[in-house]
Amino acid sequence: MTGCADRIPAHMIIERCNQITKARTMPFLTLLILLILNATSLAHELRPPVVTIDFTGSQKVAIEVSANLEAVLAGIGTEHADTDDAPQAEHYRQLRELSDTEMAAHARDGIATFLQEVRLSFNREPVELALHSVTVPDDPDTNNARTSTFLLQANLPRGANQMSWRWPEPLGDSILRVRLPEQSELYTAWLRAGEESAPIPFEGMVEPAWGDTVKRYVALGFTHIVPLGVDHILFVLGLFLLSTHWRPLLYQVTAFTLAHTLTLGLSIYGIISLSPSIVEPLIAASIVFVALENVFSAKLHAWRVLIVFVFGLLHGMGFAGVLTELGLPDSQYLAALLSFNVGVELGQLAVIGGAFLLVMPWMRGPNYRRFIVIPASLAIAAVGVWWTVERVFL
């Protein structure tokens, strides 16, 4: 045995080799611990704000912004997976302690700086924006992020025939939606941090280029898994940990992919619908089930593939909830949907590939199951139990 002298007692050889195995498994377990700590702290997860510009009124243009208002006022951008990761986290926490009425009043005083940084332009000339109203939900649980809505207004200049929009770069990505009179289609675009939209004509609206839509929604699907989809990451890791052989993993991932692709499409097209209050706890429970089975079984059973397929149906509904919230371009609906799904798959493959690289040197070792599979699965199951309780009762 490498590194062990012939005359060393057997019990010392075993102990020393166990120590070597533990040392080698530390990178994977350390990463898992950090992931789990992050998973239990995503109460203030940031999502891109949704900006809807409505031209169907009179000469007043209405701009409705649905966003984490505390993050906006604290200057925290969506490059942070969680507000706790930002340097302005303490300012954010102070704002989150405010009641709904206090926050609405504070926003009216503090939003002036934001109005100077955001830009709505007509024929490339910016116009002045004014705050019309602020609606903050009554959510006394400050451990949760809350999504507020604030309404801006601007005058529509005479002779204007196109518009553009830019969200402040420090606040990260945003979703732009434009509703024009006498046009049934809603213009939708995903804008990167500080990016100004392409000029949008008031007649003959032009959607973003097909290739740009594909690129953006692939990136959106990927980032929904890595780094934002901690629950999906833990589920995929649970699938990965079952066996050291590629075939069981292939069967499970294939079943999971087919299932979530099916329900993602059916949910987006409105054929099926299930409340997030049901879907989210069941997703958490699926993590518990897969992780605990890893502890009690070292091989793939046929019925596990079926169970994974069922759980994949639930995860697909979870993906659909996010995608519905962010919006899809009407004229490129299918392309955006498929691109998002490709991004999700690439994210899952990245998780599997990263895990494989970390544990590859000792996957065939005698202590792999003892020092990696069981401890990691128990840790994943513990997080899943906490999420299930939190999503049902808290």
Image: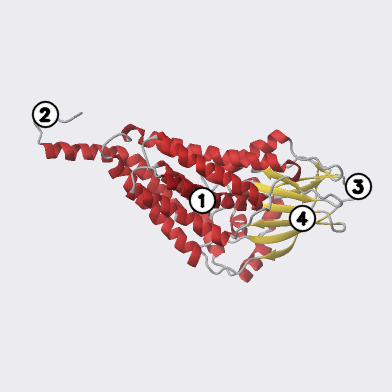
Q: Is residue 326 among the parts visible in the rendering? A: no
Q: Viewer-proximal residue, 337 or 49? A: 337
Q: Earlier in the sequence, mark 4 or mark 2?
A: 2
Gap in angstroms between the C-alphas marked 3 and 4 = 19 Å
Residue on which disc 2 sits? 6
Q: Earlier in the sequence, mark 2 or mark 3?
A: 2
Q: Which mark is residue 159?
A: 3
Above or below residue 20? Residue 56 is below
Amino acid at the residue labelled 3: Gly
Point out which mark residue 310 bears.
1
Give how far apart the Cα atoms at labels 3 and 1 are: 56 Å
Residue 313 at x, y percent in the picture: 55, 50
The image shows residue 25, relative to residue 271, as above or below, that is: above
Please tell me whether mark 3 or mark 1 is closer to you in this view: 1
Frontmost of labels 3 and 4 is 3
**Colouring scheme, one of rainbow, by chain, secondary structure, one colour:** secondary structure
CA distance for labels 1 and 4: 49 Å
Which of these two is toward me, 311 or 157?
A: 311
Which circle marks residue 129 in the picture? Answer: 4
Q: Position of residue 73 (x, y in %)?
A: 62, 57
Q: Considering only order in the chain, which callout, 1 or 3, is on the residue closer to the N terminus?
A: 3
Q: First in sequence: mark 1 or mark 2?
A: 2
At label 2, which amino acid type do we have? Asp
Q: Looking at the image, which residue is at 61% across and 38% down?
A: 218
